Image (cartoon, helix red, strand yellow):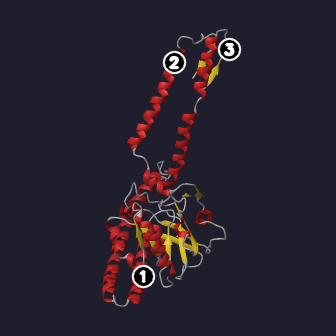
Amino acid sequence: LLVETTASPCPATNRCSKLLLNELLDISAPLNEAAGAIVDDSFWRCFKSNEPEPWNWNLYLFPLWCLGVLFRYAILFPIRLVLLLLGWVIFLSLFIPIHFIFARYDKLRRGLERGLVEFMCGVFVASWTGVIKYHGPRPVRRANQVYVANHTSMIDFIILEQLTAFAVIMQKHQGWVGLLQKTVLESVGCIWFNRTESKDRAIVTQKLKQHVARADANPLLIFPEGTCVNNEYTVMFKKGAFELDCAVCPIAIKYNKTFVDAFWNSRQQSFTMHLVRLMTSWAVVCDVWFMEPQYIQAGESAIDFSERVRELIAKRAGIKKVPWDGYLKYYRPSPKLTEKRQAKYAHSVLLTLQELRGGAAGVLPSPDADKFEL
C-alpha cells in the first residue's frame, strides 16, 4: 500500500484524505483473519502426510524405479500376504481352543494367549519387513506404573506388543479391527473407549486405576496424544495418564521415512489400506527408546508433569512440540461453513471499498495534487 499526499488548501479535501487514510490503515480485521489462517496451517501440519520426493526423473532412473515397483507388488507383496495369512491360521487354530479349553485355568490361559498375541504381532511386523531397533531396558510387569508413548499409527501398538504384551487404552473401532478388540485383545487386558461419549471418561479412569494397582496385570500402555500425529510433531498430552499417582515410563518412537511414511491418516485411508501400503513398501524402519521412569514432583500439577514427559519424548525422538490439542482435528468446520465465512468476509471488504469510493467521489483531489496507489 502506497499513499502519497500533498498539502491542499481545501479543508474538505484534507478531511476526506484523512478519512480515507484511516480507513485504509484499519487492517485489524484482515490481520485477525490472517493470524487465524496461520494458526490453522500450523495445526494441520501435524496431521499432514508428506509425499516422498520423486527421484525417477530421468531416463536411466525411471527403468530402475519401474523394476522396483514390479518387484514390490508382484513378488514381495504376495510373499508377505501369504506369510500374514499363514500367521493368522496358526494363531486362530491355537487361540480359539486355548480360550475355551483352559477357561477354568485363568492364569495359564492368559499366559498362553499373551504369548500368541506377541507371536501374531511379530508376524505383522515381518509382513512389512520391519527393521525395529529397541533401546533401553525391556518393560516388565509390576504394580503402580504406566507406559506412555507418542502416537503415529496403530502399528505403534503392534511394534511394542511384539516385544511385550501391553494392555493398551484405545479408541473403539469398527470392522475387523473392532472384532479383534472385542475378542483377541481383551485377553491382554486392553481398555476401550469412545471419544464421543462423555460418560466413558469416568468409567475408563476407574478401570485404569484398578489395572495399575495389580502387580500381575500386563503393563499398561497409553498414547496420551489421543490421535495419530505425523511423527514430526507431538501435540499436547491428555493429563489422565499423569493423575494415576504412579511411575510414568516414557517411550519414544521414531520412524525412518526413507522407505515409507508410517503415519496413518484415518480420515483419508482405512487401516486395511494403510497395511497394504506398508506391505508394498521396501521396509518399515523404526527406533524405539524405553526411558527411565518419571515421577510427579512436589508442587507439580498433572499438566506440568505431562509437559515434562512430553519434552523428554520429543527430545529423544527428534520431533517438535506444538501447543495444540489433537482432538481439535475431529472438530474441523465443514467446507460449507468455511465458504460461508469467506463469502461474508469478502462482502464486508467490498462494502468498505464502495463506501470509500462513494464518500470520496465528489471531493477527491486531482491527480496532480494527490496520488493514491492501492
Q: As rendered, which of 303 and 70 lies closer to the eye?
A: 303
Q: Position of residue 69 (x, y in %)?
A: 41, 58
The amino acid type, in three-letter code, at marker 3 is Thr
Q: Earlier in the sequence, mark 3 or mark 2?
A: 3
Residue where numbered disc 3 is placed? 6
Residue at 63% over, 65% down: 308
Badge 1 marks a residue whose secondary structure is helix
Kind of residue sitting beneath label 1: Arg
Foreground mark, 2 or 1, reads: 2
Residue at figure coordinates x 34%, y 73% from the top left: 182
Q: Earlier in the sequence, mark 1 or mark 3?
A: 3
Q: Is residue 233 visible to us here?
A: yes
Q: Residue furthest right?
A: 7
Task: Indicate the secondary structure of the residue bearing disc 3.
Answer: loop
**Residue 111 occupies quadrant:** bottom left
**SS state under label 2:** helix
Q: CA distance from mark 3 to mark 2?
A: 20 Å
* Front-most of residues 287 and 373: 373
Is the residue under label 1 in contact with that under label 2 (CB below 8 Å)?
no
Residue 33 - label = none
Picture residue at 33% right of the left edge, 73% below the top: 85
Q: List the residue tagged with mark 1.
A: 114
> Mark 2 or 1 closer to N-term?
1
| 232 left or right of 110 in image | right
Distance between the Cα atoms at labels 1 and 3?
85 Å
- x, y (%) of residue 96? 31, 82
Q: Is residue 147 above or below residue 33?
A: below
Q: Which residue is mark 2?
A: 357
Q: Please state if 93 lies on the left or on the right of 129 as rendered.
A: left
Tag 3 and tag 2, C-beta contact below 8 Å: no
Badge 2 density bin: few <14, some 14–19, many ≥20, Cα 10 Å: few
